[in-house]
Amino acid sequence: MSLFSAVEMAPRDPILGLTEAFNADPRPNKVNLGVGVYYNEEGRIPLLRAVADVEKSRLEIQAPRGYLPVDGIAAYSTVVQKLLFGQNSSLLEEGRVVTAQSLGGTGALKVGADFLKRLLPDATVAISDPSWENHRALFQSAGYPVKNYRYYDASSHDVDRTGMLADLNELPPRSIVVLHACCHNPTGVDLAPEDWKKIIDVLKARDHVPFVDIAYQGFGDGIEEDALAVRLFAESGMSFVISSSFSKSFSLYGERVGAISLVTQNRDESARVLSQIKRVIRTNYSNPPIHGASIVSSVLNSSELRAIWEVELAEMRQRIHRIRLEMVRQLAAKGVQQDFSFVSRQRGMFSFSGLNIDQVDQLRNDYGVYIVGTGRICAAALNTRNLDYVTDAIVQVLG
Ligand code: PLP
């Protein structure tokens, strides 16, 4: 028997499988709305001008490629902290935040999960129902049991606020609660400021550990607005963990640029926590890559490039919002009785469309419109050229 003869085939990733099927589809008018990336009006992943400018000057410098420190570029961590907590955060002045560069938001979640597992080996992790499909797998692979808390109410296309608070209350004390700060993936349905306050009260009362995942800062209502949850947790006095990512906001998906930040109670705790985070990183991949994080820190440390980036980010955010409005308008104009206005209230790249699995199958088989089985549409993959075709197809499958 060979070493690998007993290895079983791992289940296929449903979203990657969808893209493979899309790529193999010969129909010229096919549309892939199953993806998790932002496409511009031309249907391409944009290379931001701010990014291209920095890359050009970096190439000219011909910088050497030594190892970075285990926790990454210090100037990068500083800009991450300022984006998350605000320019004048007292937490930063008090040395209560530690940040380490990570391999995207996913890397931050994994480093955070591995670190917490040593600290709270018997805890339960709770994620929203539904959530980004990797949340469950990630925390399970760190050795945690993962439960759901109620989040999405399909009938109202809104948050099940009562259910969510009740479930958070019922978790064992000191559970780790993963929360989407903004632009909830996959539903597009976010919590309002007053919801966050209630959630924070429950987490505090139950001594839970907030793990705030912010992968879309700037894609919802704006850079500062989208950080509201982080700011409220900061004000709460709690210790908590944040995973953040520049994959979307800098369109740097393949460069793997993220960060893990931990809010502690004082400088002394911070030093000890950072030393342990470094240990987790060291034993996983030693130290992070240079390119993406150096671009982000160069852009955010230059007032000129930052201004360019902010305009580019606003363009992405506003284009998604416009296409949402246009989708709602077209569906109504094409005679759809069902009210789709909830699509325009959703935030970020994704939209829970409310389409069922039969309709999803029909969209793919009959029209070459690919969306995830749950009915999740990537609104950021719609544009003024494919929208008419997509809304026609939706009208047909709605019957
Ligand atoms: N968290 C959420 C909620 C996401 O939707 C994603 C990406 O889709 C991530 C984390 C991971 O982002 P990254 O590509 O930076 O690893």
Image (cartoon, rainbow, N blue to C red):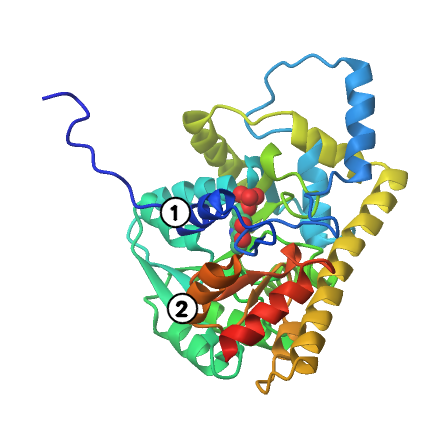
Q: Residue beneath label 2, please?
A: 357
Q: Position of residue 192 (x, y in %)?
A: 62, 74
Looking at mark 2, is its residue's CB closer than 8 Å to ligand 1? no
Query: What amino acid type should be assigned to the residue bearing mark 2?
Result: Ile
Residue 52, quarter of the rendered image: top right
Query: What amino acid type should be assigned to the residue bearing mark 1?
Result: Asp
Does residue 351 sit above or below 49 in this rendering? Answer: below
Q: Quadrant of the N terminus?
A: top left
Q: Residue beneath label 1, please?
A: 13
Q: Position of residue 269 (x, y in %)?
A: 52, 43
Residue beneath the point at 63% across and 61% down: 379
Residue beneath the point at 77% across and 18% down: 59
- Label 2, label 1: how far apart the Cα atoms are: 17 Å
Q: Most extreme residue toward the left, as rendered? A: 1
**Is residue 175 left or right of 239 when viewed as pictured?**
left
Looking at the image, do the residues carrying marks 2 and 1 touch, with CB atoms under 8 Å apart? no
In this orientation, which residue lies closer to the viewer: 165 or 206? 165
In the structure shown, which secondary structural element does the residue marked by tag 1 occupy? loop
